[in-house]
Amino acid sequence: GLTMVEPVTPGVEGGRLAGQTYVVTGTLPTLSRRAATELITGAGGHVASSVSKQTTAVVAGADAGSKLDRAKALSIPVIDEAELLRRVQSNQ
């Protein structure tokens, strides 16, 4: 017989980044901004356009500007692309 299994799509509920908000700034080494956004939202996270106290972390690449400065002023963690990938891939 056939066993029908509906694929589980990572995302909004229960994803590894569920309930977390990230801001992407600067030029990342291998990911485009769009790809980084899709990676975060695919893991259940939210991507914001500005840094606030509710921001989980700022993903900063080369030539990051005022968003990086704002994150530092608010003591928001600043991570690189490699750390973002680790966070998304952990607990799989």
Image (tube, rainbow, N blue to C red):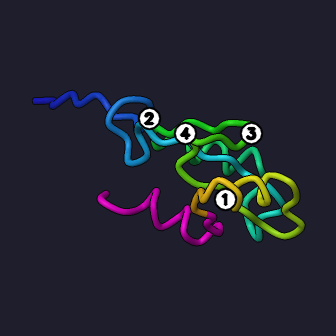
**Residue 85 locus on image (x, y percent):** 53, 64
Q: Position of residue 41 (x, y in %)?
A: 55, 38
Q: Name which of mark 2 and mark 4 comes first in the sequence.
A: 2
What is the crowding at mark 3: few (fewer than 14 residues within 10 Å), some, or many (at least 20)? some
Seen as rendered, the residue at the extreme left is: 1
Residue placed most toward the observer, 49 or 9? 49
Helix, strand or loop for disc 1: strand
Whether tag 1 and tag 4 are in contact, CB under 8 A, the answer is: no
Please give the range of residues in magenta. Answer: 78-92
Give 1 or 32, whichever is nearer the viewer. Answer: 32
What is the number of the mark on residue 92? Answer: none
Q: Classify the position of the N terminus by image quarter.
A: top left
Q: Amino acid at mark 2?
A: Gly
Q: From mark 3 to mark 1, how far is it between C-alphas? A: 12 Å
* Cα gap from disc 3 to disc 4, whole angstroms: 10 Å
Front in this rendered view, residue 35 or 86: 86
Return the x and y of residue 39 as percentages of the image width and height.
58, 48
Name the mark on residue 59. 1
Identify residue for label 4: 54
Marked residue nearer the N-terminal end (2 or 3):
2
